[in-house]
Image: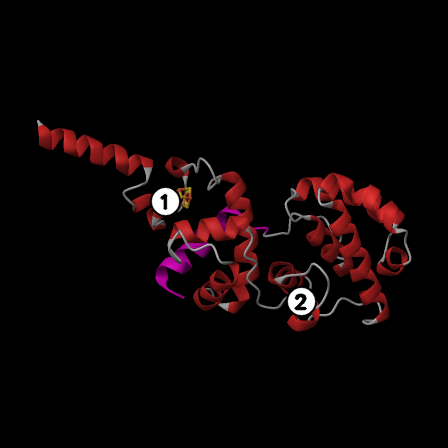
Amino acid sequence: MTPKTEAILAALTGRYPDAVCSLTYGGDPWRLLVMARLSAQCTDARVNIVCESLFARFPDAASMAAGDLSEIEDLVRPCGLFRTKAASIREISVLITEKYGGKVPSDMDELLSLPGVGRKIANLIRGDVFGLPAVVTDTHCIRIAGRLGFYPEEEKDPKRIEKILVRAIDPPYQSDFCHRLVLFGRDICTARAPKCDSCPIASLCTHAQTENHPENKQNNNKASERNIQ
Ligand code: SF4
């Protein structure tokens, strides 16, 4: 890793020592799979609430596989896109039960073959459940790693970003780095108004040093005012 990457990782580790997933899945891989699928275009906080009653009614893959689709739809309705999500999590449960003997697979291709499971969810499972190297390119990761200068900020393609970060971050740190970016993204480097003034890694951030950064804009304006006078 470059010295800059090491410094970013060290600062984030110091600030967020417990890099845990914000979905409360209780260590059950199937539950994480279901919750991750429900979290598309929905907050983790809402998924956590919805899943309390969902898992009370369907505690494992076998019970959800045998469950009534309309009942699952009603339970996951608050997460949005409830018909598609209900169909996915039921079908996932059928496959986990019938094809994988009740166990969530760790193989990337097998995970990607499950309905509604893309690389983001597959990497979350591989990193959190199986402790494998995995970069989860969620919205926080894409935004913040771009601002930090791992790639141009205009880059938004999750697959390309995953490749870049896999090369930039040593395998043992990848999964925790992504969890820490989520916490950092909610706390400091927010989407609309990042708190750059109080950011612990501002000196390492490319965005903070660009002309477009509000502080630099102000300084540039002051400089041009001085030049005019
Ligand atoms: S300086 Fe600002 S843009 Fe850069 S990482 Fe910190 S909060 Fe985010």
Q: Inspect this view and state whether residue 13 appears.
A: no
Over which residues does the magenta segment extend?
1-18
Q: In this view, does 46 lie to the left or right of 150?
A: right
Residue at horizontal 29 percent and vertical 45 percent from the top: 210
Residue at horizontal 40 percent and vertical 36 percent from the top: 198
What is the secondary structure assignment of the residue under circle 1? helix
Marks 2 and 1, how far apart at CA:
37 Å
Q: Would you say residue 6 sits in the magenta stretch?
A: yes
Residue on which the image places disc 1: 202
Residue at horizontal 32 percent and vertical 35 percent from the top: 214
Residue type at mark 1? Ala
197 over 151 or under it: above or below: above
Colour scheme of the picture: secondary structure
First of labels 2, 1 by sequence position:
2
80 over 150 or under it: above or below: above
- Residue 49 at what x, y percent from top left? 75, 40
- Residue 134 at what x, y percent from top left? 57, 64
Residue on which the image places disc 2: 112
- Residue 76 at what x, y percent from top left? 78, 44
Residue type at mark 2? Leu
Residue closest to the eye, 50 or 188: 50
